[in-house]
Amino acid sequence: MIELQGLTKTYGDKTVVSDISLRVERGEFSVLIGPSGCGKSTTLRMINRLIPLTQGRILLGDEDVTRLPAEQLRRRIGYAIQSIGLFPHWTVADNIAVVPNLLKWPRARIASRVDELLDLFHLDAGEFRDKYPHQLSGGQAQRVGVARALAADPEVLLMDEPFGAVDPLTREVLQNEMRRVHEQTGTTVIFVTHDMDEALKLASRIALLDAGRLVQYDRPIELLTAPAESFVSDFIGKADLGLKLLSRRWVHQYQQAATMSSEAPHHWETDAQGHPTCLHGGRPTTDVAPSVAVTDDWTATPGMTMKEALSRMVWYRVGVLPVIDDAGRLVGEVTLEGVMGRQP
């Protein structure tokens, strides 16, 4: 979908992007990351020609972006930024509809697309369509900004630190929303961040830059387990490398059959609908009750990260978690021994 070939940007004698070549496949979620001044935002802005490149080529599909009319190019590429940039005197609906209006879509199609996007971002159309930006929270405004960037169904969505200005709790919610939206739409995304945890959570591939050069472009798991050079492992951070690795592992990868036999060191009790109600055994220390009632906040789901599952084990002082399906039925378990017994 996007290919950079020897991309270079200089300002006078200073090179801020140096000979970067990488390929973003259709439907991928690629993240550009690196220290401040490494050239990640500059690279992003060259893709949709907000700033001109000095050398190299950028291909959108098989077309050189420098040969496309700028207006046509930007209709094919959505763009969401940290400051959002909503028009304050326009309603949410008008803000989302900017590009469809420029493309002269029929009014009914525009209204339908606005409502579709509000629903996609879990914003009730009846409540939010006619609101103004000053009536939105930071998280709501950021959702509207991303919805606007997606309004004309662009081939590529560029995002420049879009969640950097919100509080940590809202940021986590927005990250989860972005993952869900990407899974539903399949839009090709190139996302700039300085937060490695955010990159590991969202990316299918990560491009790590340093001083304008591309150090490594790989799947997150490869950056964690096979860094190309010491800068990669230093930037990722060695102190919590194991937890970062578990943030890219999923419960379903560790899931095993639930233990139901009362003769085992631990076993589950379920109700008539198959919901887990009690864990007997499975407590790693003798100073806590041997049995514990199952509550929603220490169950696991197949799509949960193992980092979150491990956190719940530690918090609730259990060596095993029940894995439940969408209906809350017990479908398996994950254990501390299973985590420790698997190779990185």
Image (spheres, rainbow, N blue to C red):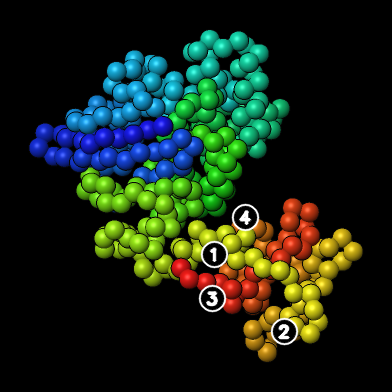
Q: Amino acid at mark 2?
A: Pro
Check whether the beta carbons of the residues at disc 2 and disc 3 lie within 8 A of each other. Answer: no
Cα gap from disc 1 to disc 4, whole angstroms: 12 Å
Q: Residue, x 57% and y 41% (percent of image)?
A: 183
Q: Residue, x 34% and y 15% (percent of image)?
A: 69
Q: Residue, x 67% and y 68% (percent of image)?
A: 256
Q: Amino acid at mark 3?
A: Gly
Q: Position of residue 96 (x, y in %)?
A: 55, 24
Cα gap from disc 4 to disc 3, whole angstroms: 20 Å
Check whether the beta carbons of the residues at disc 4 and disc 2 lie within 8 A of each other. Answer: no
Q: Earlier in the sequence, mark 2 or mark 3?
A: 2
Q: Nearer the viewer, residue 51 or 252?
A: 252
Helix, strand or loop at label 2? It is loop
Q: Position of residue 214 (x, y in %)?
A: 26, 47
**What residue did someone put label 1 on?**
307
Check whether the beta carbons of the residues at disc 4 and disc 3 lie within 8 A of each other. Answer: no
Q: The N terminus is located in which quarter?
A: top left
**What residue did someone put label 4 on?**
303
Up/down of 145 relative to 301, above or below:
above
Please identify the quarter of the rendering in which residue 97 is found.
top right
**What residue did someone put label 3 on?**
341
Q: Amino acid at mark 4?
A: Gly
Up/down of 95 relative to 209, above or below:
above
Q: In the drawing, what numbered circle is on residue 265?
A: 2
